[in-house]
Amino acid sequence: MSATQDITKPQNIRAIMTFLRQHTPFSHMDETHLAYFAEHAELRFFADGDVVLTPDDGPVQRFHVVKQGRIRGERESGKGGAVQTTFEISQGECFPLAALVGERPTRTLHRAAGDTFSLSIDKPTFVQLLSDSEPFRDFCLRGVSSLLEQVNQRIQSGAMASISSSNSLNTPLERYAIRNPIVCSPDLPVRKAVARMHENNVGSIIITDDERHPVGIFTLRDLRTMVAEEKAPLDTPIRQVMTRAPSRLTARADAFEAAMLMAEHHFAHICVVDEDDRLIGVVSERDLFSLQRVDLVNLARTIGTASHLRTLVSLRSDVSRLVDAMLAHGADSGQVVRIITTLNDVTVRRVLELNLKKNDPGIPFTWLTFGSEGRQEQTLLTDQDNGILFRTPAGMTEDQVREKLLPFAEKVNRELAECGFTWCKGNIMASNPKLCLSGDEWNEWFLRFIDASTPQNLVYSSIFLDMRAVFGPREPLQELLQKVLGRIRKNKLFQKMLAGNAINRKPPLTMFRNFRYAPDGDKHSLDLKRQGLAPFVESVRVFALANGVETANTLARMEALTRKGVFDEKDANAWQEAYSLIQAMRMRAHQEMLNKGDKLTNYINPDDLNPLDRRILRESFRQAQRLQQKLELAYQL
């Protein structure tokens, strides 16, 4: 039977901290966090054979570190009820991580093997440490097997040593993807596939057909899940447990594209293929780590698997540090805003998932984002522009659906505000009944919106016509957009009114090319968003809507319009560069404000810029004027 001992005396706390420092992850934790663990820990004794945890205990409520002795994992083998030892946990090792992080019961009976002492903390203390300590959080969320962790570290070290420091996120994948990756046929048993991975010291194996087309992938993470959850025996053909249709990019794609794909979908490996979809290499998140100098993919995964709101809140500072590092290592503004938007998307999805676990309204829905988030152009200064699109279930009215969805949406909006997505002053949020609509209601709303081109509707156009689905089925939004965009393409009057509204947003230059300061900011300040970026965004939007360009991102719209022959290639390049330069200055200003502890705004004083930056900014505004002149000419304004 177990016993508990009070260890809160100062000398005991110091002794515990000394012990913990000898083991991972405690050896990497701050002194204050280590002391917090020691102050809240209980020393528990288990005699030989005592049961420590069982699946029948319900969701795990305590976290343990073995101080002395061993813990044995036991499961029935299925052969006459015989008990099989599945693992042993020795001094300095932690348990039960997977069950505690997953907020579920353990799947294995834990029994003391000999007299055993453990340092134990309760779940609230564990959650607090998970929120406060990055090394502790990283250890708990990344894995539950120390053996696999060591293999992963060796792979990472090898990848970092083999890649030149001159590489960047613009590096084509063909330059450094692992050539001749380890492959196998779909019929190979898992045991032999894992042995092949071990022999070659790699973290994945690609399953290919006879023509070397990738049909599946199996990774160390898959092995961990397979063993922990007892999904299948090791003699199972790998085709039954592999991840089918693995993500792939051509060799001409760059590292940034691979990093974004991994971050958004939580992939750890991407196949590199030729133009005929034949496998030529593999790139892993560890390869990209050495290129990025920051762990974008791991941060996205940590956000996407967070089990508590407070963890998400604490991770927002990690996003800021990542942006700082990306800018310092030369990432361009287009890359950085996509990174911010991707991490914001992952955060929004996780808030929604956590709320669905607690209080699912029972109605399938698509979570929409508008404005800069819809365009994938968010910076660290962002507010909420979101809505809900739903299909009305049979036997229910749209108002009845709203009764179920609106309380859920309000909770999500409140929690997103806690995560740093500020409350929208104009109430453009999913908790607003006017923005929680069925597909038919959204269609009718846009019909009135387009046909009645009031000043307010033209203002709305800068928000609602840049729309994207972040969570839920995409098909309802695609159906809606096809109707809306088709209607706009046929409505020349609406286009002209949009164009007239767009050119009213003048770049901040006088006729003598001096700066025209923002009327609502501090003296001698420029609003880089409204005065600098908006003239590009709104002018390009009109051309895109008129020419059937479905993407909402401003730079992507320019590229599509160039391919369609609407924009001259040299003009488009100049506009893209000018837009990106203004965005880069805005982000750099945000980082400086954060470093000073100032409130984030979009205002800068051009007098604070060096002469070269002022000249670049002035030329960028002039390019916005040229774009607006093209719009005026196209619509004879």
Image (spheres, grey):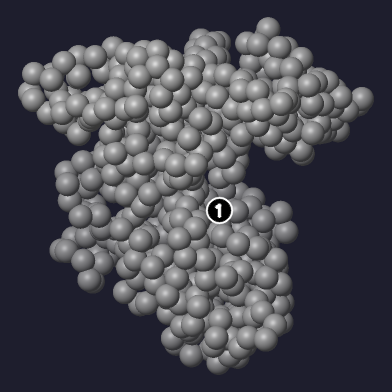
> Measured from the top left, where is residue 171 in percent x and y?
58, 27
Q: Looking at the image, is 480 positioned above or below residue 164? A: below
Q: Quadrant of the N terminus?
A: top left
**Callout 1: SS:** helix
Lateral position of residue 404 relative to residue 123, left or right: right
The answer to whether residue 230 of the structure is visible from this angle is: yes
Q: Looking at the image, is 628 positioned above or below residue 196? A: below
Q: Quadrant of residue 561?
A: bottom right
Q: What's the amino acid at mark 1?
A: Leu
Lateral position of residue 62 relative to residue 180, left or right: left
Q: Residue furthest left?
A: 10
Please tell me which residue lies in front, 207 or 227.
227
Please tell me which residue lies in front, 70 or 240.
70
Q: Quadrant of the C terminus?
A: bottom right
> Measured from the top left, where is residue 287 in percent x and y?
56, 22
Question: Residue at the location (63% across, 86% down)?
Answer: 396
Lateral position of residue 111 relative to residue 173, left or right: left
Question: Residue at the location (61% across, 80% down)?
Answer: 438
Question: Residue at the location (26% across, 18% down)?
Answer: 20
Question: Residue at the location (22% across, 71% down)?
Answer: 520
